[in-house]
Amino acid sequence: MDLNQIESTLQKMLDKPLENYEKRRIIFWEDQQEEFKDDWDSIELKDVKLQELTNDNQFYVKHLLEAEDLDSSYLIYSNLDLQSEDNWLLDMVLYAQTFKASRIDLIMNELQIDSNLRPTMEKYAVFFDNKVRYRKFKSYSGVIGSASAIELRMISVLCNLDIPSFERALRTILIESLEDDNKYLEAIRKFFDIDRFRDLVSSHYAYTREEKSLKTLFMHLIISALSFQMDEEDLALLENFIALSHTGDCYILIDHWMQNQVDASKFEEYARQIEKEINLQEIIQELSLEKYENVDIFPVIDQEIILHIANALLKDLEDFDKYLMIIENRRSKYYFKKYENLYDILYYTIKSLKFRKEFDQGLPQGKAEDIFNAYEKSYYRMDKNYRKFYLAYDKSDKYEFVNKLQEKVEYLYTHWFIGELGANWSQAVRTDLVEDWKLTGVKKQQGFYREHVSSRVSKGERIFVIISDAMRYEIATDLVERLNTETIGSTSIEPMLGIVPSITKLGMASLLPYRTLDIDSSGKVMVDEEPIEGYGARKKFIENKIENSLVYKYSDYVALSKTEKSETFKGLNLIYIYHDKIDGIGDNAATENRVFNEADSSVSELFDLINSIRNDLSGTNIYVTSDHGFLYQRSPLDESEKIAKELDKPVESSRRYALSNKEQELNGQIRINTGTVLNNENDLQLYIPNGSIRNRIQGPGANFVHGGASLQEVVIPLITFKNRRTTQKGAETVEKVNVELTSRTRSITNKLFTLQFFQSEKVKNKNIARTVNIYMEDENGNIISNIETIIANKINENSEERMFSKQFALETMEFDRKKDYFLVIKDTETNQYTAKIPFKINLGIVNDFF
């Protein structure tokens, strides 16, 4: 043994502060093997006298310490058995400190481990033969006050943990392998005690099988955890794997494993393996949905929930609110992300069917302005449901039930919604709009600049106009939602009546600062009596027409650095930015089926663009609008959805419109004099197919179209965004809703308990959703329960519909009824506590039978 190490250990013992009743320090160094007899007195220690104790000088030493020198500290070295009754100084040994120079004694002294734990330390002496293991053992914080604390540290070291934890050690072992050649288990066998380890597993998790293996241990843990969430009688076929006690502890271990982002993938791998071996799917299929709709252990549970709802929808069962609630509840479960596309397919199928049920008597006919307003307030939701359905469908595996749901949604959308709405609107157009293209209370697209921009620019205000090609109304509502919930600016949206034909060259021209707008006899768009078509012409027109103006493409804007943006747009009053993604994808037959995905990306691009204008350019006033909308359906069009062109020598034609200098009455076509649209004397005739019908034209590209007068094409969104600073009057900051504990009790008397929570405000505008994790922890921040998740995204006005009930289980451990334990509510995005509520835990007689 190194004398320097002994010297250091003794000095630490001597330097330890004296207790109130102590006047000096006396340390007895017992060395019965006389390993240090020749060297002990060469040790250099501060403020202490050295004295040897032998059989021959016991009386002298006793007199020295008890009569002759009562003030000095002493190190008494002896080769005697100091605990012997023959030792004259035994009474002094009992109240003084004893030092032994064996490796175990040095460790015990250094770590201040009580001498009564020496048998435990000696039992595991082989563990301390290795310096790396000892350094790891020593690095753990906390007092070592029991044999179990020593054993926990050893197991944690052998599993290479950063803190002592039996749960994490067991998880580490299982993650390594479920086979017998597990490296961590082998280390425990060599440097600890495999039988003792198994006893500890049994005491923690009631694993008592005669033939033990890591695989059956995992099965025991996961099936016991499953029984915690389900009625055991429903798992009768698996009763041999269910713990007779400690099922709550099994559930906590599994729950923490699933919550761990690093380790969860291995858990899922094992869970999929075990669910097949135990035929869990067959067991679940015999149960009602209510028996397992909240269970979250095996992936097959989600599969069966999805199949159950899908089959119900295919059988035309209409428990829509129930299914939507189940899907919402699944969002906080572990496997939701794995099956998110399938859940979204169900969600938007249900939303579409629910919309259909809302109009069970059919979409009402009426005046054009009534149908237009109904679309802007309600009908657009069906277009959005259809788009969101295909966003999920395109990313999902094409299972049989998925394809059947797709057929159902497609038929509902194309044959009912588009067909019926198109017929009603076409009739209203014939009656109310053909002679005068305007609606009471609705602004016209071609009045945009004059009514919204002109006067503000004249006053010297700085205005940004973003035009996104083919961004139809329902897509724009997604952008408004993001702006309302993720910025402090104020955002509003209103519909404009789009110009017809709903084509890019005319729609773009209608948004310019023009005096006159027209289409000549050859189909050219004329602005202020000059032809204009394409980005270059529009850029030249605006910059020549309006002083201190600039026109930019979105792609060029995002390529600029922040400094370049600041320099480029400095001192300008009017900035137009053109964004062309949706139309660019949709108008190409090879890519038209990606139009919904592009629309989703465009919302993100436009949101980022507005944020850049706010932050990089200090922009305050921003308009976002579009040149036209579009019609799109995924399925190939039937011949009945196409109409033969009977128009004689059209000036210009496409699938959704034709222009002619001749007046003709054509079956299935609405004829509109362009002069009534442009408010001039133009007698060019516009022919538009009824509803969503296309003109029959050879070649692909009939699914994505525009140019006609359907609501999807002519309800033009106008978003007005006003940026605000937090210090400005009227500024509303974005705040997450709170999740609050409503249960009044602050005392826990059972290992299994339920608490009630409340979402304080409904989600609306600047009050946005919050996701929290909730669990119990001790004073040191150690999690001592399962972790429950709440997604607080309720939009309900009724507060009772914003309540949540969560069940918790406490770990089996000793609880100090005088100490505080804490219920933690933590935001998952920021990882910050939103609440930390003290509780007392008084379990009385601990009941482990759950």
Image (cartoon, rainbow, N blue to C red):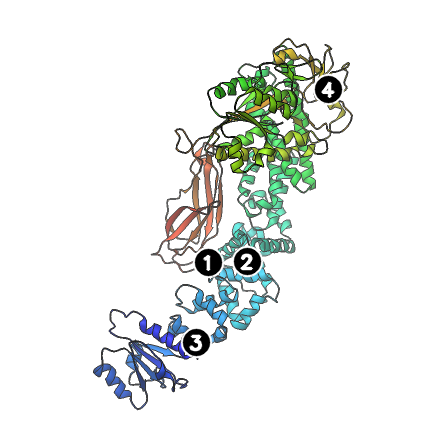
Q: Is residue 105 above or below residue 695?
A: below
**Residue named by callout 3:** 104
Instruction: Return the disc, 3 or 4, that comes first in the chain's sequence.
Output: 3
- Amino acid type assigned to the residue bearing label 3 in the image: Ile
- Asked if one can make out residue 360 in the rendered structure from this viewpoint, the answer is no
Residue 277: image location, x then y, percent: 65, 56
Q: For the residues marked 4 and 1, what is the alpha-carbon distance in whole angstroms?
A: 79 Å
Kindly check if marks 2 and 3 are in contact, taking CB atoms under 8 A apart as contact: no
Kindly check if marks 4 and 1 are in contact, taking CB atoms under 8 A apart as contact: no
The disc at residue 718 is: none
- Amino acid type assigned to the residue bearing label 1 in the image: Asp
Q: Is residue 86 above or below residue 706?
A: below
Between marks 2 and 3 in the image, the one whose residue lies nearer the viewer = 3
- Amino acid type assigned to the residue bearing label 4 in the image: Ser
**Residue at the (64%, 33%) spot, across then down:** 596
Q: Nearer the viewer, residue 584 or 271?
A: 584
**Residue named by callout 4:** 653
Between marks 2 and 4 in the image, the one whose residue lies nearer the viewer = 4
Tally of marks: 4
- Asked if one can make out residue 738 in the rendered structure from this viewpoint, the answer is yes
**Residue at the (46%, 67%) spot, across then down:** 137
